[in-house]
Amino acid sequence: MTRPESDRGPAATGADPEGAQLIAAECEGSLDLQVDVGVLVAHAPGGDADGLRSFAAQAAADAVDELAAATAVGWRFYLEDPARLPDHDRRRPSEFLDRATHLMVEGPYDLVVAVTDVPLVSSKERFVPGLASPLARVTVVSTRNLRRAPRGESERALDDPAVRWNGATLLVHLIGHVLGARHRDADGGVMEPFVFESDRRAVPAMDADVETYLRRIAGEIPATEVSPKGALARVGFHAKSALGNAGRIGRALVDSRAPLLPLSLPKLSTAAVTPTLVIVFSAESWDVGVHMDNLTATLFAAVSVLAAAIYLLFAQNLSFPRRRQRLVTEHTALVNVTVFLVLVLAMCGLFALVLSIILVVELAVFPPNLMANWPSLEDPSIGLVDLVRTGAFISTIGVLSGALAGGLENRTVVSHLTLFLDRP
Protein backbone atom coordinates (compact mmCIF):
# COMPACT_ATOMS: atom_id res chain seq x y z
CA MET A 1 0.00 0.00 0.00
CA THR A 2 2.82 2.35 0.80
CA ARG A 3 5.80 3.33 -1.31
CA PRO A 4 8.76 5.67 -0.84
CA GLU A 5 7.78 9.32 -0.94
CA SER A 6 9.87 9.92 -4.05
CA ASP A 7 7.59 7.58 -6.01
CA ARG A 8 4.33 8.94 -4.71
CA GLY A 9 1.37 11.10 -5.48
CA PRO A 10 -0.16 13.11 -8.29
CA ALA A 11 3.08 14.99 -8.74
CA ALA A 12 4.50 11.82 -10.28
CA THR A 13 1.82 11.98 -13.00
CA GLY A 14 2.35 15.64 -13.78
CA ALA A 15 -0.63 16.98 -11.83
CA ASP A 16 -0.36 20.32 -10.07
CA PRO A 17 -0.78 19.84 -6.29
CA GLU A 18 -2.05 23.40 -5.97
CA GLY A 19 -4.61 23.04 -8.75
CA ALA A 20 -6.72 20.01 -9.60
CA GLN A 21 -4.94 17.98 -6.89
CA LEU A 22 -5.13 20.40 -3.96
CA ILE A 23 -3.45 19.03 -0.84
CA ALA A 24 -6.02 19.14 1.95
CA ALA A 25 -3.76 17.82 4.72
CA GLU A 26 -0.47 16.01 5.22
CA CYS A 27 1.64 14.68 8.05
CA GLU A 28 4.96 12.86 7.91
CA GLY A 29 5.50 9.59 9.76
CA SER A 30 8.60 8.12 11.32
CA LEU A 31 9.10 5.81 8.32
CA ASP A 32 10.08 6.92 4.82
CA LEU A 33 6.71 5.80 3.46
CA GLN A 34 3.59 7.68 2.49
CA VAL A 35 -0.09 6.91 2.00
CA ASP A 36 -1.87 9.04 -0.61
CA VAL A 37 -5.60 9.54 -0.08
CA GLY A 38 -7.95 10.98 -2.68
CA VAL A 39 -10.93 12.90 -1.27
CA LEU A 40 -14.00 12.91 -3.52
CA VAL A 41 -16.77 15.39 -2.67
CA ALA A 42 -20.16 14.41 -4.13
CA HIS A 43 -23.00 16.85 -3.48
CA ALA A 44 -26.71 16.83 -4.29
CA PRO A 45 -28.18 19.35 -6.77
CA GLY A 46 -28.35 22.75 -5.10
CA GLY A 47 -26.17 21.55 -2.24
CA ASP A 48 -23.42 23.57 -0.63
CA ALA A 49 -20.47 22.24 -2.62
CA ASP A 50 -18.00 24.72 -1.11
CA GLY A 51 -19.18 23.98 2.42
CA LEU A 52 -18.96 20.24 1.85
CA ARG A 53 -15.49 20.66 0.36
CA SER A 54 -14.39 22.70 3.39
CA PHE A 55 -15.81 20.06 5.73
CA ALA A 56 -13.89 17.31 3.92
CA ALA A 57 -10.64 19.29 4.07
CA GLN A 58 -11.13 20.04 7.77
CA ALA A 59 -11.89 16.40 8.56
CA ALA A 60 -8.71 15.36 6.77
CA ALA A 61 -6.67 17.97 8.64
CA ASP A 62 -8.09 16.83 12.00
CA ALA A 63 -7.53 13.14 11.21
CA VAL A 64 -4.09 13.15 9.61
CA ASP A 65 -2.02 13.49 12.79
CA GLU A 66 -3.67 10.54 14.50
CA LEU A 67 -3.32 8.39 11.38
CA ALA A 68 0.37 9.20 11.10
CA ALA A 69 0.94 8.49 14.78
CA ALA A 70 -0.97 5.19 14.61
CA THR A 71 0.70 3.79 11.50
CA ALA A 72 4.18 5.41 11.65
CA VAL A 73 3.91 6.36 7.96
CA GLY A 74 3.19 9.69 6.30
CA TRP A 75 -0.31 10.58 5.15
CA ARG A 76 -1.32 13.05 2.45
CA PHE A 77 -4.90 13.91 1.52
CA TYR A 78 -5.62 15.30 -1.95
CA LEU A 79 -8.89 17.16 -2.45
CA GLU A 80 -10.50 16.41 -5.81
CA ASP A 81 -12.92 18.66 -7.68
CA PRO A 82 -16.54 18.31 -6.45
CA ALA A 83 -18.90 15.99 -8.34
CA ARG A 84 -22.61 16.80 -8.68
CA LEU A 85 -25.07 13.98 -8.02
CA PRO A 86 -28.19 13.72 -10.22
CA ASP A 87 -30.67 13.82 -7.32
CA HIS A 88 -31.14 13.91 -3.55
CA ASP A 89 -32.02 10.21 -3.20
CA ARG A 90 -30.32 8.01 -0.65
CA ARG A 91 -27.26 6.12 -1.84
CA ARG A 92 -25.57 2.81 -1.24
CA PRO A 93 -21.81 3.24 -0.72
CA SER A 94 -21.19 0.98 -3.72
CA GLU A 95 -22.65 3.70 -5.96
CA PHE A 96 -19.45 5.69 -5.37
CA LEU A 97 -17.18 2.77 -6.28
CA ASP A 98 -16.98 3.46 -10.00
CA ARG A 99 -15.73 7.01 -9.55
CA ALA A 100 -13.54 6.05 -6.59
CA THR A 101 -11.71 3.23 -8.39
CA HIS A 102 -11.22 5.50 -11.39
CA LEU A 103 -9.63 8.13 -9.15
CA MET A 104 -7.49 5.50 -7.49
CA VAL A 105 -6.01 4.49 -10.84
CA GLU A 106 -5.69 8.04 -12.18
CA GLY A 107 -4.33 9.60 -8.94
CA PRO A 108 -2.70 7.26 -8.19
CA TYR A 109 -4.11 6.91 -4.67
CA ASP A 110 -3.78 4.22 -2.04
CA LEU A 111 -7.34 4.76 -0.87
CA VAL A 112 -10.25 7.08 -1.57
CA VAL A 113 -12.60 8.90 0.79
CA ALA A 114 -15.98 9.96 -0.62
CA VAL A 115 -17.83 12.71 1.27
CA THR A 116 -21.46 13.33 0.37
CA ASP A 117 -24.47 15.23 1.68
CA VAL A 118 -27.10 12.66 0.65
CA PRO A 119 -28.34 9.90 2.99
CA LEU A 120 -26.27 6.70 3.11
CA VAL A 121 -27.82 3.27 3.71
CA SER A 122 -26.21 0.03 4.86
CA SER A 123 -26.84 -3.49 3.61
CA LYS A 124 -29.60 -3.73 6.22
CA GLU A 125 -31.27 -0.60 4.79
CA ARG A 126 -30.34 1.48 7.83
CA PHE A 127 -29.25 5.10 7.56
CA VAL A 128 -25.60 5.35 8.62
CA PRO A 129 -23.03 8.18 8.81
CA GLY A 130 -20.42 6.21 6.88
CA LEU A 131 -19.21 2.81 5.71
CA ALA A 132 -15.89 1.31 4.66
CA SER A 133 -14.72 -1.31 2.18
CA PRO A 134 -11.44 -2.84 3.41
CA LEU A 135 -10.88 -4.71 0.15
CA ALA A 136 -11.66 -1.83 -2.25
CA ARG A 137 -9.96 0.67 0.10
CA VAL A 138 -12.87 3.07 -0.22
CA THR A 139 -14.70 4.87 2.59
CA VAL A 140 -17.89 6.90 2.29
CA VAL A 141 -18.93 9.59 4.78
CA SER A 142 -22.40 11.17 4.77
CA THR A 143 -22.89 14.52 6.46
CA ARG A 144 -26.67 14.03 6.49
CA ASN A 145 -26.48 11.80 9.54
CA LEU A 146 -23.83 13.94 11.24
CA ARG A 147 -25.90 17.11 10.90
CA ARG A 148 -29.06 15.58 12.32
CA ALA A 149 -30.16 17.34 15.50
CA PRO A 150 -32.50 16.26 18.32
CA ARG A 151 -36.20 16.76 17.72
CA GLY A 152 -37.24 20.37 17.99
CA GLU A 153 -33.78 21.74 17.15
CA SER A 154 -32.54 23.05 13.81
CA GLU A 155 -30.13 20.99 11.72
CA ARG A 156 -26.48 21.43 12.64
CA ALA A 157 -24.22 23.40 10.30
CA LEU A 158 -21.26 21.80 8.59
CA ASP A 159 -18.87 24.01 10.56
CA ASP A 160 -20.50 23.14 13.88
CA PRO A 161 -17.77 21.86 16.28
CA ALA A 162 -19.74 18.68 16.97
CA VAL A 163 -20.06 17.94 13.26
CA ARG A 164 -16.39 18.73 12.70
CA TRP A 165 -14.94 16.46 15.37
CA ASN A 166 -17.40 13.62 14.91
CA GLY A 167 -16.66 13.76 11.18
CA ALA A 168 -12.91 13.51 11.80
CA THR A 169 -13.43 10.67 14.29
CA LEU A 170 -15.60 8.82 11.81
CA LEU A 171 -12.98 9.29 9.11
CA VAL A 172 -10.20 7.80 11.26
CA HIS A 173 -12.55 5.01 12.34
CA LEU A 174 -13.41 4.06 8.75
CA ILE A 175 -9.80 4.23 7.58
CA GLY A 176 -8.98 1.95 10.50
CA HIS A 177 -11.42 -0.57 9.02
CA VAL A 178 -9.75 -0.19 5.63
CA LEU A 179 -6.41 -1.06 7.24
CA GLY A 180 -7.88 -4.17 8.85
CA ALA A 181 -8.83 -2.99 12.35
CA ARG A 182 -11.99 -4.40 13.90
CA HIS A 183 -14.36 -2.85 16.40
CA ARG A 184 -13.11 -2.73 19.97
CA ASP A 185 -15.96 -2.27 22.43
CA ALA A 186 -15.69 -0.04 25.50
CA ASP A 187 -11.98 0.74 25.30
CA GLY A 188 -12.35 4.49 24.77
CA GLY A 189 -10.43 4.41 21.50
CA VAL A 190 -11.38 5.47 18.01
CA MET A 191 -12.22 1.89 16.97
CA GLU A 192 -15.21 1.71 19.27
CA PRO A 193 -18.46 1.35 17.27
CA PHE A 194 -19.05 4.91 16.09
CA VAL A 195 -21.65 6.93 17.98
CA PHE A 196 -22.24 10.65 17.46
CA GLU A 197 -21.29 12.60 20.62
CA SER A 198 -22.36 16.22 20.70
CA ASP A 199 -19.62 17.19 23.16
CA ARG A 200 -16.77 15.58 21.20
CA ARG A 201 -13.91 18.04 20.60
CA ALA A 202 -10.99 15.77 19.65
CA VAL A 203 -10.24 12.57 17.79
CA PRO A 204 -9.88 9.61 20.20
CA ALA A 205 -6.54 7.86 20.16
CA MET A 206 -5.80 4.43 18.78
CA ASP A 207 -5.07 1.87 21.47
CA ALA A 208 -1.69 0.10 21.44
CA ASP A 209 -2.88 -3.16 19.88
CA VAL A 210 -4.56 -1.41 16.98
CA GLU A 211 -1.51 0.79 16.38
CA THR A 212 0.73 -2.27 16.09
CA TYR A 213 -1.70 -3.98 13.74
CA LEU A 214 -2.09 -0.91 11.55
CA ARG A 215 1.67 -0.48 11.23
CA ARG A 216 2.02 -4.06 10.04
CA ILE A 217 -0.90 -3.87 7.61
CA ALA A 218 0.25 -0.53 6.17
CA GLY A 219 3.55 -2.12 5.20
CA GLU A 220 2.00 -5.26 3.70
CA ILE A 221 -0.71 -4.01 1.37
CA PRO A 222 0.82 -3.56 -2.09
CA ALA A 223 -0.12 -1.08 -4.78
CA THR A 224 1.45 -2.80 -7.79
CA GLU A 225 0.36 -1.42 -11.15
CA VAL A 226 0.47 -3.25 -14.47
CA SER A 227 -0.83 -2.78 -17.96
CA PRO A 228 -1.67 -6.36 -18.97
CA LYS A 229 -1.62 -7.02 -22.69
CA GLY A 230 -4.34 -9.36 -23.77
CA ALA A 231 -7.00 -11.34 -21.94
CA LEU A 232 -4.66 -14.13 -20.81
CA ALA A 233 -2.20 -11.69 -19.23
CA ARG A 234 -5.04 -9.96 -17.41
CA VAL A 235 -6.42 -13.27 -16.11
CA GLY A 236 -2.94 -14.32 -15.00
CA PHE A 237 -2.39 -11.06 -13.13
CA HIS A 238 -5.74 -11.43 -11.35
CA ALA A 239 -4.92 -15.03 -10.40
CA LYS A 240 -1.47 -14.09 -9.09
CA SER A 241 -2.89 -11.22 -7.04
CA ALA A 242 -5.57 -13.49 -5.58
CA LEU A 243 -3.12 -16.22 -4.59
CA GLY A 244 -0.91 -13.70 -2.84
CA ASN A 245 -3.82 -12.26 -0.84
CA ALA A 246 -6.01 -15.32 -0.26
CA GLY A 247 -6.61 -14.43 3.38
CA ARG A 248 -8.02 -10.98 2.60
CA ILE A 249 -10.29 -12.41 -0.09
CA GLY A 250 -11.45 -15.13 2.29
CA ARG A 251 -12.39 -12.60 4.97
CA ALA A 252 -14.33 -10.56 2.39
CA LEU A 253 -16.21 -13.67 1.25
CA VAL A 254 -17.15 -14.56 4.82
CA ASP A 255 -18.35 -11.02 5.52
CA SER A 256 -20.38 -10.91 2.29
CA ARG A 257 -22.61 -13.93 3.10
CA ALA A 258 -22.61 -14.53 -0.65
CA PRO A 259 -24.79 -17.70 -0.74
CA LEU A 260 -27.65 -15.62 0.68
CA LEU A 261 -27.34 -13.00 -2.07
CA PRO A 262 -30.21 -14.46 -4.18
CA LEU A 263 -32.59 -13.59 -1.34
CA SER A 264 -31.75 -9.91 -1.99
CA LEU A 265 -32.35 -10.31 -5.74
CA PRO A 266 -36.00 -11.42 -6.15
CA LYS A 267 -35.96 -11.03 -9.93
CA LEU A 268 -33.06 -13.44 -10.25
CA SER A 269 -34.64 -15.97 -7.88
CA THR A 270 -38.02 -15.78 -9.57
CA ALA A 271 -36.51 -16.32 -13.02
CA ALA A 272 -34.73 -19.40 -11.66
CA VAL A 273 -37.59 -20.99 -9.75
CA THR A 274 -40.49 -20.41 -12.16
CA PRO A 275 -39.39 -22.63 -15.07
CA THR A 276 -38.30 -25.46 -12.76
CA LEU A 277 -41.82 -25.72 -11.34
CA VAL A 278 -42.95 -26.59 -14.86
CA ILE A 279 -39.99 -28.81 -15.77
CA VAL A 280 -40.32 -30.93 -12.61
CA PHE A 281 -43.69 -32.22 -13.87
CA SER A 282 -42.22 -33.20 -17.25
CA ALA A 283 -41.58 -36.89 -17.93
CA GLU A 284 -38.64 -36.01 -20.18
CA SER A 285 -36.79 -34.29 -17.33
CA TRP A 286 -37.24 -37.36 -15.16
CA ASP A 287 -36.06 -39.58 -17.99
CA VAL A 288 -32.84 -37.57 -18.28
CA GLY A 289 -32.34 -37.18 -14.55
CA VAL A 290 -32.83 -40.82 -13.65
CA HIS A 291 -30.56 -42.14 -16.40
CA MET A 292 -27.80 -39.57 -15.83
CA ASP A 293 -24.87 -40.80 -13.75
CA ASN A 294 -23.79 -38.91 -10.63
CA LEU A 295 -20.49 -37.65 -12.09
CA THR A 296 -22.18 -36.19 -15.16
CA ALA A 297 -24.83 -34.50 -13.02
CA THR A 298 -22.14 -33.02 -10.75
CA LEU A 299 -20.03 -31.73 -13.64
CA PHE A 300 -23.09 -30.29 -15.38
CA ALA A 301 -24.07 -28.42 -12.23
CA ALA A 302 -20.53 -27.11 -11.60
CA VAL A 303 -20.00 -25.92 -15.17
CA SER A 304 -23.43 -24.29 -15.25
CA VAL A 305 -22.86 -22.41 -11.97
CA LEU A 306 -19.48 -21.19 -13.24
CA ALA A 307 -20.95 -20.18 -16.62
CA ALA A 308 -23.79 -18.29 -14.92
CA ALA A 309 -21.30 -16.36 -12.74
CA ILE A 310 -19.11 -15.46 -15.73
CA TYR A 311 -22.13 -14.33 -17.71
CA LEU A 312 -23.35 -12.06 -14.91
CA LEU A 313 -19.85 -10.63 -14.39
CA PHE A 314 -19.56 -9.48 -18.00
CA ALA A 315 -23.23 -8.82 -18.80
CA GLN A 316 -23.63 -6.57 -15.76
CA ASN A 317 -20.14 -5.02 -16.15
CA LEU A 318 -19.21 -5.74 -12.56
CA SER A 319 -15.43 -5.51 -12.99
CA PHE A 320 -13.38 -2.45 -11.99
CA PRO A 321 -12.30 0.07 -13.11
CA ARG A 322 -15.08 0.56 -15.66
CA ARG A 323 -13.85 3.78 -17.23
CA ARG A 324 -10.29 2.73 -17.99
CA GLN A 325 -9.48 -0.90 -18.66
CA ARG A 326 -5.81 -0.65 -19.73
CA LEU A 327 -4.37 -0.09 -16.25
CA VAL A 328 -5.12 -2.44 -13.40
CA THR A 329 -3.77 -2.17 -9.86
CA GLU A 330 -3.31 -5.16 -7.61
CA HIS A 331 -5.99 -4.09 -5.16
CA THR A 332 -8.42 -3.56 -8.07
CA ALA A 333 -7.63 -7.09 -9.23
CA LEU A 334 -8.48 -8.32 -5.73
CA VAL A 335 -11.82 -6.52 -5.91
CA ASN A 336 -12.59 -8.11 -9.27
CA VAL A 337 -11.65 -11.60 -8.06
CA THR A 338 -13.77 -11.17 -4.94
CA VAL A 339 -16.79 -9.99 -6.91
CA PHE A 340 -16.45 -12.98 -9.23
CA LEU A 341 -16.13 -15.45 -6.34
CA VAL A 342 -19.15 -13.86 -4.68
CA LEU A 343 -21.12 -14.41 -7.89
CA VAL A 344 -20.00 -18.05 -7.94
CA LEU A 345 -21.10 -18.53 -4.33
CA ALA A 346 -24.33 -16.67 -5.06
CA MET A 347 -25.07 -19.05 -7.93
CA CYS A 348 -24.34 -21.94 -5.57
CA GLY A 349 -26.81 -20.41 -3.13
CA LEU A 350 -29.36 -20.04 -5.93
CA PHE A 351 -28.79 -23.69 -6.88
CA ALA A 352 -29.38 -24.76 -3.27
CA LEU A 353 -32.53 -22.64 -3.06
CA VAL A 354 -34.03 -24.12 -6.23
CA LEU A 355 -32.97 -27.66 -5.29
CA SER A 356 -34.64 -27.38 -1.90
CA ILE A 357 -37.90 -26.32 -3.54
CA ILE A 358 -37.72 -29.13 -6.10
CA LEU A 359 -37.02 -31.73 -3.40
CA VAL A 360 -40.04 -30.53 -1.44
CA VAL A 361 -42.16 -30.95 -4.58
CA GLU A 362 -40.72 -34.41 -5.25
CA LEU A 363 -41.06 -35.68 -1.69
CA ALA A 364 -44.23 -33.97 -0.48
CA VAL A 365 -46.32 -33.11 -3.55
CA PHE A 366 -45.69 -35.93 -6.03
CA PRO A 367 -47.92 -39.02 -5.59
CA PRO A 368 -45.61 -41.91 -4.53
CA ASN A 369 -46.47 -44.14 -7.46
CA LEU A 370 -46.67 -41.48 -10.14
CA MET A 371 -43.29 -42.23 -11.72
CA ALA A 372 -44.09 -45.95 -11.96
CA ASN A 373 -46.74 -45.12 -14.58
CA TRP A 374 -44.39 -43.12 -16.84
CA PRO A 375 -43.60 -45.36 -19.86
CA SER A 376 -40.36 -43.45 -20.57
CA LEU A 377 -38.72 -44.92 -17.46
CA GLU A 378 -37.24 -48.39 -17.95
CA ASP A 379 -37.04 -48.99 -14.20
CA PRO A 380 -40.05 -47.46 -12.41
CA SER A 381 -38.47 -47.80 -8.97
CA ILE A 382 -37.22 -44.36 -7.90
CA GLY A 383 -34.92 -44.06 -4.90
CA LEU A 384 -33.75 -41.06 -2.89
CA VAL A 385 -30.53 -40.75 -4.90
CA ASP A 386 -32.58 -40.62 -8.10
CA LEU A 387 -34.75 -37.87 -6.63
CA VAL A 388 -31.72 -35.81 -5.60
CA ARG A 389 -29.98 -36.30 -8.96
CA THR A 390 -33.09 -35.38 -10.91
CA GLY A 391 -33.70 -32.39 -8.67
CA ALA A 392 -30.09 -31.27 -9.18
CA PHE A 393 -30.46 -31.57 -12.95
CA ILE A 394 -33.63 -29.47 -12.91
CA SER A 395 -32.09 -26.95 -10.51
CA THR A 396 -29.10 -26.51 -12.81
CA ILE A 397 -31.43 -25.51 -15.60
CA GLY A 398 -33.05 -23.06 -13.18
CA VAL A 399 -29.71 -21.42 -12.35
CA LEU A 400 -28.94 -20.89 -16.02
CA SER A 401 -32.44 -19.55 -16.60
CA GLY A 402 -32.13 -17.16 -13.67
CA ALA A 403 -28.81 -15.77 -14.89
CA LEU A 404 -29.91 -15.38 -18.50
CA ALA A 405 -33.48 -14.20 -17.99
CA GLY A 406 -33.45 -12.55 -14.58
CA GLY A 407 -29.96 -11.13 -14.28
CA LEU A 408 -29.26 -8.59 -11.56
CA GLU A 409 -31.91 -5.92 -11.19
CA ASN A 410 -29.43 -3.76 -9.30
CA ARG A 411 -25.73 -4.36 -9.86
CA THR A 412 -24.82 -2.03 -6.99
CA VAL A 413 -26.37 -4.55 -4.59
CA VAL A 414 -23.67 -7.08 -5.45
CA SER A 415 -20.82 -4.60 -4.89
CA HIS A 416 -22.53 -3.29 -1.76
CA LEU A 417 -22.98 -6.68 -0.11
CA THR A 418 -19.62 -7.92 -1.37
CA LEU A 419 -17.27 -5.09 -0.45
CA PHE A 420 -18.74 -2.89 2.28
CA LEU A 421 -19.17 -3.60 5.96
CA ASP A 422 -22.74 -3.41 7.27
CA ARG A 423 -22.06 -0.82 9.98
CA PRO A 424 -19.58 2.02 10.63
Image: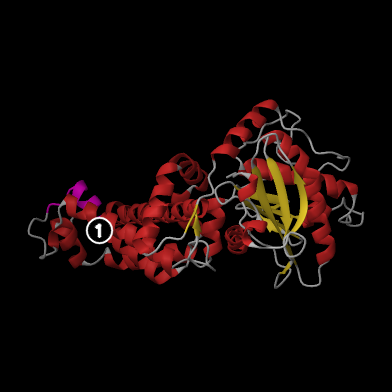
Q: Position of residue 42 (x, y in %)?
A: 72, 64
Residue 217 image point, x, y percent: 58, 37
Q: Is residue 277 visible from the viewing direction of this image?
A: no
Left or right: residue 369 compared with residue 85: left
Query: Can you give x and y, in whole percent of width and height, for residue 361 in the image?
Result: 31, 56
Horizontal and vertical percent position of residue 92: 63, 59
Say whether residue 34 is left or right of residue 342: right
The residue wearing badge 1 is 393
User: Which residues, given as a range, are shown in magenta?
Assistant: 381-391
* 397 lies above or below 174: below
Residue under the point 38% across and 50% down: 239
As drawn, which residue projects farthest toward the front? 6
Give residue 144's quadrant in the image. bottom right
* Vertical position of residue 96 compared to residue 338: above or below: below
- Element on which disc 1 rests: helix
Q: In the rendered image, which quarter contains the N terminus?
A: top right
